[in-house]
Amino acid sequence: MLNTKQQQFVDYAVEKFGSNELTVAQLKEANTKFGCKYAPQWLIKNTDYKVGKGLFQLPTESDGSSAKTSGTAEKVLPQETINTEAAYVVSSLTGNIVPAKDPSFVSFGNYPDLKSIVRSNMFYPVFITGLSGNGKTFGVTQACAEAKKEMIRVNITIETDEDDLLGGYRLKDGQTVWQNGPVIEAMERGALLLLDEIDLASNKIMCLQPILEGSGVYVKKINKFVKPKNGFNVVATANTKGQGSDDGKFIGTNVLNEAFLERFPITFEQKYPTANIEQKILINSLKSAGKKDDDFAKKLVTWADVIRKTYFDGGVDEIISTRRLVHIVQAFGIFNNKMKAIEVCTNRFDDDTKNSFSELYQKVDAGATAEQISEEARQADMKSQMDDNDSESDDEDVI
């Protein structure tokens, strides 16, 4: 027997199309009357109603098929699912979603301020920008872990849209249901929403405008207004300031809408940690990898410091991030070979860059300081300029 909602659908569909044999497209069109954009699953999943390819016969009283079943016991659905074709899923997350503390984490830079914002439980959106691998996302995660704050992380791409963020209709147990997106989940739980790599997004994320104002959002697909629970907040991370990447290092980043960026009251500029802090991070990471070698950690930091200075001066096109240093000590824990650890973790660079980085570390390992290496590089540049000038003079003499 059909339940009330199913019978209403059948009566409406027959009246609308003047037939009890309908295509899937007609079934979908009829079902929009009842707030659903898909064909009714209870009908198209029952093979007794299928009379041809993409053609189904409605169980009307006139053909005596109203009591048709698939030959198996009919599944008893919860009352709220029976009453609506598009049931509302309150939550798709269960259990505790507070991030775990990482024993290797060391506080630096803007972390104390970020932690204060998280602990305040205020709605105060934060934009964090900085080069890749300098701990932007990790800092947010650990601030939530320390404050025992639930966090939902969303990795943004150019394809991310309203359906990904707010939610959409999904197929669940043969029924079309509404599935909350991560934004709605965070709002209803009072959790922190982390929008990672926000500068990869397109203008489709403009659906977040009202949410970034803290006033809640009207979800038009389910005709529901969602008001954020106390404690809800938004943090976005990016490699740029939302103005795109001119040098091509962060290809795929986009220019974000100015009105969107204005919804973030403050922006933290994340720098790489100081040498002392970075050395502590590596010592902790070595300990987690089952190693104790403070000298190796110190030399890696010196090596990375020289490369970064050269990078910012325009001397090289690549940089060694804190994340890559951690990868190196982890590789050292696996292979128990320092040079192999550096080699496998710098293989992603072109051959010239990789070889120059390897040679530079060998100098550091031999005892050279950052100042000595910088002075050596400066002398080499001066010699190169003098050789160029001499070459130009020779050319003029020939002329």
Image (spheres, rainbow, N blue to C red):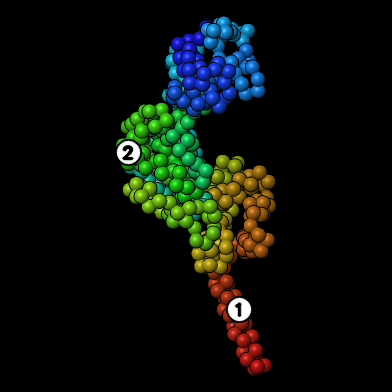
Q: Nearer the viewer, residue 381 or 267?
A: 267
Percent of width and height locating residue 156: 49, 43
Q: Name the mark on residue 214.
A: 2
Report whether 96 appears left or right of 290: left
At numbered mark 1, what does the secondary structure look like: helix, strand or loop?
A: helix
Q: Position of residue 232 (x, y in %)?
A: 36, 35
Residue displayed at 42% across by 49% down: 128
Question: Given the image, on which type of amino acid does mark 2 rest?
Answer: Gly
Left or right: residue 267 versus residue 2 is left
Q: Position of residue 191 (x, y in %)?
A: 40, 33
Eye-nearest disc, 2 or 1: 2
What residue appears at the point 51 percent right and 9 percent down from the top-left corner?
Answer: 2
Give the answer, above or below, for where 305 lies relative to 267. below
- The residue closer to the viewer here, 120 or 343, is 120
Quadrant for the C terminus in the image = bottom right
Is residue 370 at all visible to an observer of this figure?
no
Task: Identify the residue at horizontal 44%, vertical 43% (top origin).
Answer: 205
Dot 2: element = loop
Classify mark 1: residues with Cα within 10 Å, few (<14), some (14-19) or many (20+): few
Q: Is residue 195 visible to us here?
A: yes
Residue at far front of view: 18
Give the mark, 2 or 1, whose residue is nearer the N terminus: 2
Query: What numbered label is drawn on residue 384?
Result: 1
Q: Residues within 10 Å of mark 2 (few under 14, many from 20)?
A: some
> Identity of the amino acid at label 1?
Ser
Residue 214: x, y in percent? 32, 38
Relative to the observer, which residue lies in front, 187 or 192? 187
State the residue at coordinates (53%, 63%).
311
Residue 177 vertical placement versus 63 (above, below): below
